[in-house]
Image: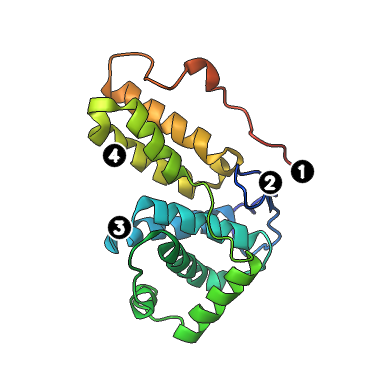
Amino acid sequence: SNGTVIPPHRIQYSTIYLEILYVVFIFQVTAESRCKLISWLIPVHRYLRLSFECCSLSVNIMDRFLASTPVASDCFQLLGVTALLLACKQVEVFSPRISQLLSLCCDAFSREQLCNLECLILLRLNFRLAAPTIAFFLDFYANHSLAGRRKRGSRLALRVCELTLADYAFNKYTPSLTARLNTYISYIYFSPYWPPVGIEPTTLALQTPCSTN
């Protein structure tokens, strides 16, 4: 691949489940291919009428799996839809049919391949699917900061969050900080008042939340 190879990063999420040691040694998977896959998953989750929380969690599941397991480039799309299916089972009331997900991949993969990969992901992650995502913090800050402008401001913040979700460069920041800044941008755009309630400008220093190896 001609893309930039994803460098190793240590990412610590504030969760009771685990601390992620993000070391990607799979040279078939690049930052560019990851961006293309997530940019494809975003309209897919809208088409299936899934929540942004589901989309964010699927990216989190995919990233954690890649941290420990080699994935060939021709199976990368299968990993994306499988992670989306697992995220659906975790946060949605109903999950899409496997046949529906496979049809979105032009039936390039079989049902057996998807089910086998689903089991492998669960084993690699020790069935720990839950994680703090950018969608959770975005909803929290939108409720506390955008007030009467919540609908328009949330829509803008959501679109910016989708862009940051696809860009690997933002993985070095915690989901809470990324969501906080996106909400800040939305508030600046829609409100003449400064600063938004619950967000102090002095606390928004862009510092890497955790060390890198």
Q: Earlier in the sequence, mark 2 or mark 1?
A: 2
Residue with the mark numbered 2: 9
- Spatial CA distance of label 3 from label 1 is 36 Å
> Please, what is the three-letter code of the amino acid marked with disc 4?
Arg
Check whether the beta carbons of the residues at disc 2 and disc 1 lie within 8 A of each other.
Answer: yes
Front-most of 38 and 187?
187
Q: Residues within 10 Å of mark 3 (few under 14, many from 20)?
A: few
Which SS class for mark 1?
Answer: loop
| Residue 213: mark | 1
Q: Is residue 132 visible?
A: yes
- Secondary structure of the residue carrying tag 3 is helix
Q: Residues within 10 Å of mark 4 (few under 14, many from 20)?
A: few
x and y percent of residue 46 in the render?
30, 57
Q: CA distance from mark 3 to mark 2?
A: 30 Å
Give the SS element for disc 2: strand
Amino acid under disc 3? Arg
Along the line of sight, the residue nearer the viewer: 117 or 78: 117
- Judging from the image, what secondary structure is the residue with disc 4 in? helix
Which residue is tagged 4? 155
Marks 2/4 in contact by CB < 8 Å: the verdict is: no
Quarter of the image containing the C terminus? top right
Which residue is at 54% across, 20% downward? 203
Alpha carbons under labels 4 and 3: distance apart: 14 Å
Residue denoted by label 3: 46
> Tag 2: residue type?
His
Q: Quadrant of residue 99?
A: bottom left
